[in-house]
Amino acid sequence: MPVDSAFDPERFVSTLASRAHGGLLGLRYIAHGADWSELAIDYSERLIGDEASGVLASGPILALMDMATSMAIWIRQQRFRAQATLDLRVDYLRPATPGKAVIGRGECYRLTRSVAFVRGQAHDGDPADPVAHVAGTYMFTSP
């Protein structure tokens, strides 16, 4: 995607992200606003971390939240801009419920010339009962 083009999150997920890591996870676009994005991964046996309980591994949830927060930055800027994750803290509050999709919402709450600040949460159906909270910073790697 050219650096100066308008960023379309739904198109990004359905085309570009589906060919890469997001496609392997089954990443789905849900919705977005001026500074946030909401994505989901459906429950899949391929993503189970604990076979005895059927609970999803933490890695797919982290990847979901990394993409949701990254997309929130691009949405807020109204363009794709190369960036690197400087810090993404994930606090896992409880295991995701086996059989349920995990929904991740990321928000970009502050932009500077070189750094974006994000926060978000993942849940499996009830935003009032989150699976995880995230907070992080991204550094822009292009002008």
Image (cartoon, rainbow, N blue to C red):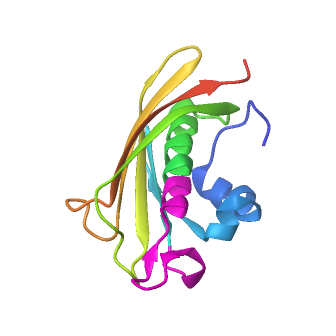
* Residue 105 painted magenta: no
Confirm whether residue 29 shows in the render. no
Residue 2 higher or lower than 40, as above or below: above
Residue 134 higher or lower than 22, as above or below: above
Q: Residue at the spot x=65%, y=61% of the render?
A: 22
Confirm whether residue 82 shows in the render. yes
Location of the N terminus by quadrant is top right
Residue 114 higher or lower than 76, as above or below: above
Nearer to me, 42 or 58: 58
- Residue 122: quadrant of the picture: bottom left
Q: Residue at the spot x=43%, y=83% of the render?
A: 54
| Residue 104 x, y percent position in the rendering | 42, 57
| Residue 110 x, y percent position in the rendering | 42, 24
Judge left or right: residue 59 versus residue 134: right
Nearer to me, 36 or 93: 93
- Residue 141: quadrant of the picture: top right
| Residue 98 x, y percent position in the rendering | 38, 81
Q: How many labels does the image show?
A: 0
Location of the C terminus by quadrant is top right
Q: Residue at the spot x=41%, y=63% of the render?
A: 103
Most distant residue in the right direction:
2
Most distant residue in the top direction:
113
Q: Residue at the spot x=59%, y=16% of the render?
A: 114
The residue stretch that appears in magenta: 42-64
Residue 86 higher or lower than 16, as above or below: above
| Residue 36 x, y percent position in the rendering | 43, 44
